[in-house]
């Protein structure tokens, strides 16, 4: 049998290892001969999850320039989730039960209010590239949470080393000057991003045992929509409505929000779901290494975000820690055949 640590991290790779992905998906990997031959579609799908998800951090930064963060994220996920839900239901997927809606609402609150809401709020204070790099610590939080919950009684040396290296990378990225009030890096903003990564990890752990629909698209739509409602409610409770003036919303912010809805939450997620059936888990998980790099480069090219020596070193250290943690997840169990290794059990089925 697979170890709990392997299944935990593998489910993370299916659910979205960088926070700008979508809701928890429940997909069984069965790679058919026909899908292996879908060359152009594979290229386009990988380009979508590499480039679109890598660009969403910059889009968030542009969107929150004139739209309050919680309401912005709430509208994004409520609209995207509702459209995706309608599309899935029109395709004949059975309606979810009440208990599944409750589970989706809890997962949606953790993933979207707790994680995406924190990131959107933080991007008013930190560069988009830094937010992407700090979000890349997600696998480290999942390993710690799984250990705390009792899923992983023995972490193994790669996981322990990955944790140490990963949080060392965070320390390098923020730097000792981050503790001073005149620092160029907002310590509060960086802490909010790390809290968002923690909340996404918590949502990942919760979703593993939650009573969610087996359809990945339906489950994601429900979590997006309910998470969007949670974000909108939080925005109203914190007074964001009084700070939202449609006349002052810039074209850049409005277009960024539309981009997040159409490309970030619908097109890229659909590509990700298809890739889970058309490619191997190892290949699909490579977005975890590409997205932060795309985010940093786009922030530098389009938003004048600086890339210093510290950023380069921290990027290498954090991505190395992710590789250490993921390498353990991709090692096939000794007693399993090669065919069994290619098929991952669906989470929550």
Image: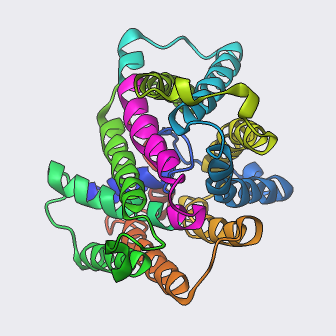
Q: Is residue 106 magenta?
A: yes
Q: Point out the image quarter for the C terminus.
A: top left
Residue 151 in the figure: left or right of residue 118: left
Q: Is residue 3 visible?
A: no
Tell me the residue at 63%/52% (across/down).
Answer: 61
Q: In this rendered view, identify the residue nearer to me: 14 or 190.
A: 190
Q: Percent from the top left, x then y, of residue 47?
A: 76, 59
As rendered, which of 269 and 197 lies closer to the eye?
197
Q: Is residue 317 visible?
A: yes
Q: Position of residue 315 (x, y in %)?
A: 51, 78
The part of the chain drawn in magenta is 104-132
Is residue 5 highlighted in magenta? no
* Nearer the observer, 304 or 265: 304
How many numbered callouts?
Answer: 0
Q: Main secondary structure of the magenta part?
A: helix
Give the quarter of the image for residue 286: bottom right
Q: Position of residue 167 (x, y in %)?
A: 32, 74
Quarter-of-image position of residue 64? top right
* Residue under the image location 41 percent in, 62 percent down: 190
Q: Please say if 260 is above or below 134.
A: above
Name the residue furthest right.
40
- Looking at the image, the residue that sits furthest to the bottom is 309
Q: Nearer the viewer, residue 55 or 302?
A: 302
Instruction: Measuring from the top left, give residue 139's x and y in whole percent.
Output: 38, 61
Going 50% across and 29% down the picture, which residue do you hit? 240
State left or right for residue 230 relative to residue 71: left
In the image, residue 43 above or below residue 226 = below
């Amino acid at each position: 049998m697979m170890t709990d640590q392997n299944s935990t991290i593998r489910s993370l790779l299916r659910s979205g290892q960088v926070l700008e992905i979508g809701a928890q998906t429940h997909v069984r990997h069965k790679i058919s001969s026909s899908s292996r031959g879908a060359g152009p579609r594979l290229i386009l799908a990988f380009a979508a999850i590499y480039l679109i998800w890598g660009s969403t951090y910059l889009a968030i930064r542009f969107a929150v320039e004139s739209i309050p963060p919680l309401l912005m994220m709430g509208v994004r996920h409520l609209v995207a989730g509702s459209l995706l839900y309608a599309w899935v239901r029109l395709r004949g997927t059975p309606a979810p039960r009440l208990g599944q809606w409750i589970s989706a609402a809890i997962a949606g609150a953790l993933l979207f209010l707790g994680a995406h809401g924190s990131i959107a709020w933080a991007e008013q204070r930190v560069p988009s590239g830094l937010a992407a790099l700090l979000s890349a610590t997600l696998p480290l939080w999942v390993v710690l949470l799984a250990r705390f919950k009792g899923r992983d009684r023995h972490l193994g040396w790669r996981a322990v080393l990955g944790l140490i290296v990963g949080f060392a990378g965070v320390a390098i990225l923020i730097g000792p000057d981050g503790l001073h009030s005149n620092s160029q890096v907002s310590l509060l903003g960086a802490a909010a991003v790390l809290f968002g990564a923690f909340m996404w990890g918590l949502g990942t752990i919760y979703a593993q045992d939650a009573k969610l629909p087996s359809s990945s698209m339906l489950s994601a739509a429900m979590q997006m929509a309910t998470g969007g409602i949670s974000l909108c409610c939080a925005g109203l409770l914190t007074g964001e409505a009084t700070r939202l003036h449609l006349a002052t919303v810039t074209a850049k912010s409005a277009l960024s929000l539309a981009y997040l809805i159409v490309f970030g939450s619908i097109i890229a997620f659909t590509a990700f779901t298809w890739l889970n059936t058309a490619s191997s888990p190892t290949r699909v998980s490579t977005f975890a290494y590409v997205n932060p790099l795309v985010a940093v480069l786009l922030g530098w090219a389009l938003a004048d975000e600086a890339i210093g020596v510290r950023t380069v070193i921290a990027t290498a250290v954090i991505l190395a820690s992710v590789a250490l943690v993921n390498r353990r997840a991709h090692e096939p169990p000794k007693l399993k055949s090669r065919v069994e290794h290619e098929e991952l059990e669906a989470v929550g089925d």
